[in-house]
Image (cartoon, grey):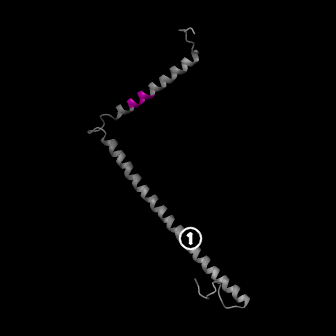
Amino acid sequence: MAQNDKVQIPVAHLSTVDRNFNNVTAELEAVKNGMTILSGVDDVHGARMGSAVESSFSEWKISRRTLLDNVGGLSDASSQIASSTSEFDVQMAYSLGESASKLRGGNEGSSGSGERM
């Protein structure tokens, strides 16, 4: 098999590659320019940025605590609803058993012992 030094690449493809490299260059320059703007604005390099991060973190901790408190409150409310519903079901079953027993002419509750659960 003979080797050929000729390479054929569509011109449109080369133009696309050119644009992609130019985009990469522009993005790298933008990052450099952004960091250069930050350089020298503080007496201690990065102090204002560190302060901004700390402030953001403090606000996040407060909002996170509020969220956790609210979720805990919803959990408590759900637990109380479940407990109340369960208690209501037991009382309703007992009362219905009592009523059914009276309709049949007996004096015993649905549990058979005559005691409430």
Q: Which residue is mark 1?
A: 82
Side of 111 where 58 appears, left or right:
left
Q: Residue at x 40, y 52 (%)?
A: 59
Tag 1, which secondary structure? helix
In-front residue for pair 3/81: 3
Give coordinates of residue 93: x percent, y percent.
64, 80
The single residue placed furthest to the left in the displayed view is: 43
Residue 48, above or below 78: above
Q: Main secondary structure of the magenta part?
A: helix
Q: For residue 53, what is the image quadrant?
A: top left
Residue 96, above or below 81: below
Asked if residue 32 is among those painted magenta in the image, a careful observer would answer yes
The single residue placed furthest to the right in the displayed view is: 104
Side of 22 where 10 appears, left or right:
right
Residue type for callout 1: Ala
Magenta segment range? 27-33
How crowded is the residue under tag 1: few (<14 C-alpha within 10 Å), some, or many (20+)? few
Asked if residue 76 is among those painted magenta in the image, a careful observer would answer no
Give coordinates of residue 2: x percent, y percent.
56, 8
In-front residue for pair 48/62: 62
Give coordinates of residue 76: x percent, y percent.
50, 68
Residue 36, above or below 114: above
